[in-house]
Amino acid sequence: MTFADAKQRFSTRVADYVRYRPGYPPTCLALLGAVCGLERQHVIADIGSGTGLLSQLFLRNGNRVFGVEPNEEMRAAGEAFLDDYAEFQSVPGSAEATTLPADSVDLIAAAQAFHWFNPTAARVEFERILRPGGWVVILWNERLTDTTPFLRAYETLLLRFGTDYHQVKQSYPGPEQMRSFFGSWPFTTYELPNSQEFDFAGLSGRLRSSSYVPTPDEFRFWPMMDELQRIFAAYQQSGGVRIDYRTRIYASQWRRDGSHA
């Protein structure tokens, strides 16, 4: 599914996104090392890099990273967040037009952003910038919705107050969409556990960071926050609640000699 405002819809949520969105499990690096042969000399293109959560993981590994982000506010936040990393280069571009040179990167990663791409145009661009034999890795944190009473209540809140929550939720690709994107290139799938723990202030920020919930200038915002307070009071333990995720990872090696990995 394509959203007309996909490149701008997080502009007013940057501060909460930076503070309250989940990162990616450190075990991702070990998995990519085993599956993709990831080494510190490899050059990474983080497409839809946002505030830099995934880029930081690669930078800590010693990789050079191009963070390609179309949203000006998100890109600025990523630049500030990663200011101490000399190997990070911020790029104003998109999945469909990265502006990176041809054959310039060893691994393309897209985290929590793929569902906003035009997959046909992105595939063409990925093939252009990826070196022969390079890897494409698509990953995102999938929030679990039905494993605890708190998570069920939180999901009910989103369904009740979310603006286009159902549409966004349905836009995340399933196996068929991923097969269509990768085409003839074989791919493998993996899952890693991930989680966050929040006090009420943190949970409020996590909710506000989502593009599909009302903003404070909308009349449904305050009833939503009252309901969030009720849910937190009902399910908190020792002053906190936990949001559990499943980090989904799709990895595919793209060759140009007619062979497959």
Image (tube, grey):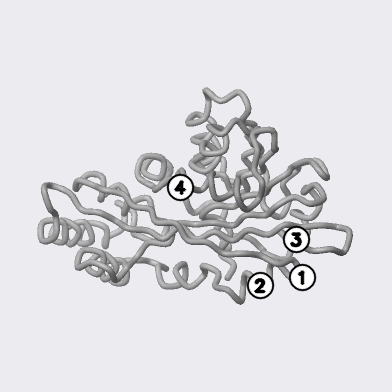
For the residues marked 2 and 1, what is the alpha-carbon distance in whole angstroms? 8 Å
Of callouts 3 and 2, which one flags the residue occurring earlier in the amino acid sequence? 2
Q: Is residue 238 left or right of residue 125?
A: left
Of callouts 3 and 4, which one flags the residue occurring earlier in the amino acid sequence? 4
In percent of the image, x 34 and y 52: which residue is there? 195
Of callouts 1 and 3, which one flags the residue occurring earlier in the amino acid sequence? 1
Vertical position of residue 214 compared to residue 51: above or below: below
Residue located beneath label 1 in the image: 184
Residue 119, which numbered label? none
Q: Nearer the viewer, residue 220 or 64?
A: 64
Q: Which residue occupies the extreme right position in the image?
A: 257
| Mark 1 element type | loop
Residue located beneath label 3 in the image: 261
Of callouts 1 and 4, which one flags the residue occurring earlier in the amino acid sequence? 4
Q: Look at label 1 and name its amino acid.
A: Ser
| Mark 4 element type | loop
In percent of the image, x 75 and y 60: which residue is there? 261
Residue located beneath label 4 in the image: 24
In percent of the image, x 27 and y 68: which residue is there? 147
Q: Residues within 10 Å of mark 1 (few under 14, many from 20)?
A: few
For the residues marked 3 and 4, what is the alpha-carbon distance in whole angstroms? 26 Å
Residue located beneath label 2 in the image: 179
**The quarter of the displayed image where residue 169 is located:** bottom left
